[in-house]
């Protein structure tokens, strides 16, 4: 088994601003695992919100003794080994986990969705994200996003009203809102939600900071639209903890440690009749296509990271009229552009 | 796709008595699904506790329009179709689900444990069950069970003390106790548990009736050994419901509707840090081998249904020094005795 990795700067079409930060470039780490003539691809998109940077990802990958992962089929044991090196370093572990899954699918000659018993006919539509910006820029972005029927609007900053007004002035599409922990007073958060519903927003993601679960439970009791957990749900063990405070969860591969962990979170949320969403960071088609393999199990998809960039070195899952389209290629279903 | 089925009388080595019933013969329904030259095997072991008999299984199988299951790989959709016919009929749905999984594993040429990312080196030991009987008979059964290092003792009847004394008079093996809802007064149940611990019993399963969850939570708070849910956990949605009242859950394929449902229950219990056990009815090697494919994920296994019978038409998972031994045969890993 050979492990190779390198950093890569994803160029953003627009400067991307959310409640906490702003950027033009997003650096990811690509991973390749080669074994028995098959190469599995993986990707880490580290987030400072969870204590990761490209450097911490590389540091983690240097710690991996790849001979301890001698059989990619041993998904549970391999995930256990990676977790034994660090219980954090989520995106770094995810990069290897995706590559191992890609390898397994290729060895079996089937896409991962088939291994999980899913139908490619059951994929949902994905939202397309409109970052925080000036009203004029936002109107321009919404017009550019014409082909996407569902939009996700980033709020939680200083000028929420201005942003949503700008969006609604040019479209009557279904909107979903992500506040990224931006509202810190429960009464104000409730006013915001009443206002969101008046603007026909379908649901709101993470209205309050992750350490304000009780306040969020108070809010959810009074909210007339679903409240979805994002920063409050990192790993599997967080899912039962947010029961009662949220109506659903947003799973991200880069938070949870990999595809098998995400599958477990999906099943757990289903047992509690919570709605299930998958989201992403700014990512290439590697990580997005990996997540999309699970998408037939989702209620909501926000898998647009690869649609926001201009230099994706891979191609995989496609989007048609907003819907995720899975191919019958094996593993995560990606190929390198201009090659394999 | 062709669906064939027939009833079969499993002959018990000893008359089998638990708190609710007693029997010499246990009738199961074998299922075969043939498609593209591959045959998948399945089995229903109906339990009257859950409203099923061999007749209700046959009635259910007659209702199945097999052309609606044209692709065995669509595990989720196929399970959804079967559930749309009946939300009960657990073992009947399980029979088809096992056969579909067996078919998928055979089509891929791998055992199911490999498809689920598990290592055959991680299988646990199984208990061997000693049914309710006279002290003399019990001593005889315990001696016959010499090769099994873990014993499961059925209590919850009129003569608990007599039975456990008989067992302990001839062995100091690890014992696990199943009360099958037999204790109906919480204070008495607590006395029983104190007495079990004094007799070095590792845990107790379903001490009180399934409709006494609050009493069981009271009991568990005071119990010094783990309390495991059996009759209280039928399907996936029951797992979060018993949190707090039990330390773990006993999953049975014949209760939950199939292998994929069992996998979901295992992951859900893991998210709540509950311990995970799989149990069985009196079953042939078909259903036992199917459950054993999941056994690397278990804390406790009670998969001895095929060890209690004398006319098993199949062979599959083996037991060596009590440990479940999975082969590398594809699917559920069974062959018909004297053939395939």
Image (cartoon, coloured by chain):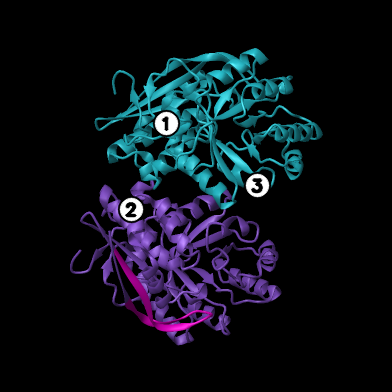
Chain colours: A cyan, B purple
Picture mark count: 3
Between residue A115 and residue B11, name the one nearer to us: A115
Q: Residue at x 28, y 38 (%)?
A: A107
Label located before the other in sequence (3 or 1):
3
* Residue B339 relative to residue B189: left or right: left
The residue tagged 2 is B72
Report the chain holding disc 1. Answer: A
Place of residue A35 in the rendered image (x, y in percent of width and height, measured from the top left): 28, 31
**Marks 3 and 1, Cα distance to the nearest angstrom?**
29 Å
> Does the rendering let one see residue A45?
no
User: Residue A33 got which mark?
Assistant: none
The residue tagged 3 is A243
Please check whether the numbered discs 1 and 2 fall on a single chain: no
* Residue A89 relative to residue A37: left or right: right
The residue tagged 1 is A289
Identify whether A181 is placed above or below A109.
above
User: Local crowd at mark 2 within 10 Å, few (<14), some, or many (≥20)?
Assistant: many
Q: Where the C terminus of chain B falls, by quadrant?
A: bottom left
């Amino acid at each position: 088994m050979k492990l190779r990795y390198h950093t890569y700067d994803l160029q953003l079409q627009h400067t991307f601003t959310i409640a906490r930060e702003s950027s033009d470039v997003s650096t990811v780490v690509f991973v390749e695992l080669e074994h028995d003539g098959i190469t599995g691809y993986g990707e880490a998109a580290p987030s400072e919100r969870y204590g990761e940077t490209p450097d911490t990802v590389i540091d983690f990958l240097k710690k991996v003794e790849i001979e301890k992962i001698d059989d990619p089929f041993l998904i549970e044991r391999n995930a256990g080994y990676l977790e034994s090196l660090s219980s954090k370093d989520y995106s770094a572990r995810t990069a290897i986990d995706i590559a191992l899954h890609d390898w397994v699918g290729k060895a079996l000659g089937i896409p991962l969705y088939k291994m999980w018993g899913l139908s490619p006919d059951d994929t949902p539509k994905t939202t397309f994200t409109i970052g925080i910006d000036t009203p004029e820029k936002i109107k321009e972005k919404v017009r550019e996003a014409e082909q996407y029927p569902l939009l996700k609007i980033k709020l939680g900053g200083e000028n929420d009203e201005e942003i949503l007004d700008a969006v609604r002035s040019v479209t009557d599409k279904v909107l979903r809102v992500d506040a990224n922990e931006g509202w810190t007073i429960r009464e104000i958060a409730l006013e915001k939600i009443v206002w969101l519903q008046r603007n026909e927003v379908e649901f709101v993601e993470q209205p309050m900071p992750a350490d304000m679960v009780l306040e969020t439970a108070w809010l959810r009791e009074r909210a007339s639209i679903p409240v979805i957990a994002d920063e409050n749900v990192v790993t599997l063990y967080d899912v039962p903890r947010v029961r009662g405070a949220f109506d659903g969860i947003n799973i991200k591969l880069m938070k949870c440690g990999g595809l098998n962990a995400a599958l477990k979170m999906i099943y757990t949320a289903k047992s509690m009749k919570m709605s299930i969403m998958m989201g992403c960071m700014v990512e290439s088609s590697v990580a997005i296509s990996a997540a999309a393999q699970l998408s037939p199990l989702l209620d909501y998809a926000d898998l647009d990271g690869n649609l926001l960039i201009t230099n994706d070195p891979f191609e995989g899952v496609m989007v048609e009229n907003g819907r995720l389209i899975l191919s019958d290629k094996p593993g995560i279903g990606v190929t390198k552009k201009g090659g394999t």
